[in-house]
Amino acid sequence: MVETVDRYIADLPEARKARFMLLHQMIVDEYPDVVVDMHYRMPTYRQGEGWVALANQKNYISLYTCSAAHIESFKTDHPHIKTGKGCINFKDKDPLPLDDLLSVVRHAISRPKGA
């Protein structure tokens, strides 16, 4: 089991590391005081009661939030990118619309589940 965020990132396949790091850096740049730790075996970014998490999956990188409400606007604007109940799954060929993803992160961290 991966014990630290640094180890998780180091173990990423080289083909995915740059995209993962772009998302990671976007979050920590926006929230310099965010607590980054391993939760549910993936890097999790917490501030107050809000959080998001990143995970490398077999076929994509996922951005998890704690509620479908956090990704509603993203789903409307990017119907071609796969989503789940409260997550966005980026295949290697999918674009990373960083401005829209930053909005998702802000929504999830600033307004936790139920807010």
Image (spheres, grey):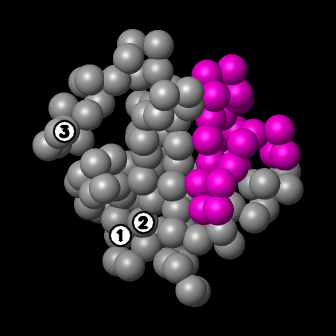
Q: Amino acid at mark 1?
A: Gln
Residue at the image position 56 percent from the left and 31 percent from the top = 60
Give the residue number, with chain letter if any, for mark 2.
Answer: 51
- Residue 85 on the magenta segment: yes
Picture quadrant where residue 106 is located: bottom right
Q: Mark 2 or mark 3: which comes first in sequence?
A: 3
Q: Are marks 1 and 2 in contact (CB under 8 Å)?
A: yes
Q: Is residue 5 above or below residue 64?
A: above
Q: Is residue 115 left or right of residue 77?
A: left
| Segment colored magenta | 78-101
Q: Nearer the viewer, residue 104 or 28?
A: 104
Could you say which is closer to the camera, residue 103 or residue 84? 84
- Where disc 1 sits, the SS reads strand
Q: Disc 2 marks which amino acid? A: Trp
What's the mark number on residue 47?
A: 1
Q: Is residue 41 visible?
A: yes
Which quadrant: the N terminus?
top left
Tell me the residue at 75%/39% (across/down): 81
What is the tally of numbered marks visible in this picture?
3
- In the picture as drawn, the residue positioned furthest to the left comes out as 3
- Looking at the picture, how far across and down is residue 22, in whole percent? 48, 32
Question: Around disc 2, counting alpha carbons within 10 Å, would you say few (fewer than 14), some (14 to 19), or many (20 or more)?
Answer: many
Choose the circle earlier in sequence order: 1 or 3: 3
On the image, which quarter does residue 5 sit in? top left
Q: Position of residue 64 (x, y in %)?
A: 51, 55
109 left or right of 11 in image: right
Marks 1 and 2, Cα distance to the nearest angstrom? 6 Å
Any mark on residue 2, and which?
3
Q: Residue at x 43, y 34 (%)?
A: 56
The answer to which quarter of the image holds residue 17 is top left
| Residue 103 in sight | no
